[in-house]
Each structure stands twice: as structure tokens, then as C-alpha cells.
Amino acid sequence: MKKSIVVFGLGQYGKSIALELTNAGADVLAVDNNKERVNELSDIVTCSVIADACDTESMQTLGISNMDAAVVAITQSLDASIMATIFCKDAGVPYIFAKAKDTIHTKILYKVGADKVVIPEHESGIRAARQLLTGNILDFVELSDTIRMIEITIRPEWIGQTLRELNLRQKENINVVAIRSHGEILVNPNPDHALEADITLLIIVNQKDIQKVING
């Protein structure tokens, strides 16, 4: 079943989310108080509407109570960001993802009902720093306080060996969940297939073991 998601705020961040959700097959309701931004997406997303998050009457006409999730990507107006989040919460939207501009904004959004709040610039900075410090790590996702899913290039000495031969779970405390080869992700890879030089591994690892993964 298609997911229905409302996106408030169609700046660069909100627009990119709306487009990606649409490309992934979701029904997207895109909302902004800027007519040009709304019109830009009118022929792409399921529905685009001009509405001011601070205007209760216009918000009530949106009919978002049956939405599966909401994205609040408004940062230029703190009031609008807060009001959109509260409105989604009161409407019974089960999951609210919001963008914040700083830590105070983040705390406020969590307080009024957001389920997940991100500061994209802050997180992209952290990701860049990690990549600078961890040359063979291509991507990095926090699954919990201690568990990470990361994508790594394979070590030169692993080329030509199989996952069964490497026995990474026992020797390195690494769980290989997928292989990326020629742009394709192969889940549950064949443990007896020899690893090629141009592949990457998607692995789950404890944070305390990451340095071992990096340094070999």
C-alpha cells in the first residue's frame, strides 16, 4: 500500500524530500505559503497546496488526519515550524519528521510532538568529519547508541577470498548484511562467492569495533 506523506516547507530541503518520496512511489501532499514553490511541484507530486502553517483555518482544509507521516521542513519561521508540528500531532499523524536550525529549535520541536528532528547542516558536517577520519568508510548510519551500519571498501587482502573464508563475524566482529556491486545492492550475499576489488560491503558493527574495521 502506498504511504501518504505531507511535506510542509518547500525550500531546497523540503523540495528534495518531496521529490524523493514521489520517486519512491509515495502519495505526497506538498504545502508552502510561497505560490512559486507550490506551482513548481504541482505537476510532480500528488497534490501541492498554498497554505500558511500559522493560519489555522487554511491548515484545517488540508485533511491530513489520514496521513502516514509528516515532514516539517520549515526553518525560516520558528512559529510556523512549531504550529505545523502541533497541527500534525493534534491531527493524529503517527510520525512527524522535522528540520531544525539549531539545538534550541530541536528541543522545542521534540517538546511539541516531533518524533525525529534533524539539523541537516550539523549532521552533514559530522558525516564529513567521519569520512575524513575513516578513509575506507563510505557511509555511516546510527542504528542505536552503540550499533552502526556502515558501508566500507574492502581491504586489499580480502580480494579473491570468500566471506566464508574471511569469517568476519568471528574474527572481526563484523556482520555483513549486503554487498554493493556495480550499483546493485545484493542482500544476503553468497558466502562462497569470491570478493572483487570494486565492491563495497554494508556491515553492522558495534561502535567500539569501528577503529578495528578502519585500521585492519
Image (tube, grey):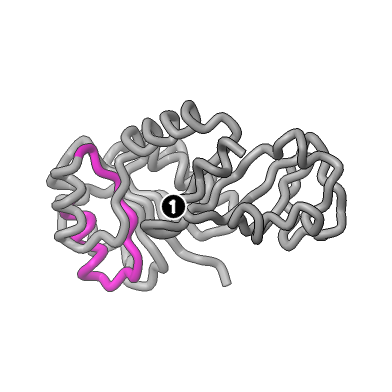
Across and down, in percent, residue 210 comes to 50, 45
Decide: is 171 above or below 159: below
Q: Residue at x 32, y 67 (%)?
A: 63
| Residue on which the image places disc 1 | 142
Across and down, in percent, residue 76 comes to 21, 35
Q: Residue at x 44, y 50 (%)?
A: 208
**Left or right, residue 180 beside residue 29:** right
Q: Is residue 87 magenta?
A: yes
Q: Residue at x 46, y 40 (%)?
A: 16
Q: Residue at x 62, y 39 (%)?
A: 216
In what element is the residue under mark 1?
A: strand
Decide: is 88 above or below 37: below
Across and down, in percent, residue 49 comes to 36, 50
**Left or right, residue 43 beside residue 129:** right
Numbered label tally:
1
Decide: is 212 above or below 116: above
Nearer to the camera, 44 or 75:
75
**Quarter where residue 92 is shown:** bottom left
Nearer to the camera, 114 or 169:
169
Nearer to the camera, 66 or 108:
108
Across and down, in percent, residue 78 comes to 15, 43
**For the N terminus, which image quadrant?**
bottom right
For label 1, count other residues whose C-alpha is less than 10 Å away and answer few (under 14), some (14-19) or many (20+): few
**Left or right, residue 65 beside residue 58:** right
- Residue type (three-letter) at the residue carrying disc 1: Glu
Specify start and end residues of the magenta stretch as a single range: 82-102
Is residue 135 visible to the viewer in this orientation of the structure? yes
**Left or right, residue 122 beside residue 164:** left
Residue positioned most to the top: 132
Q: Is residue 19 magenta?
A: no
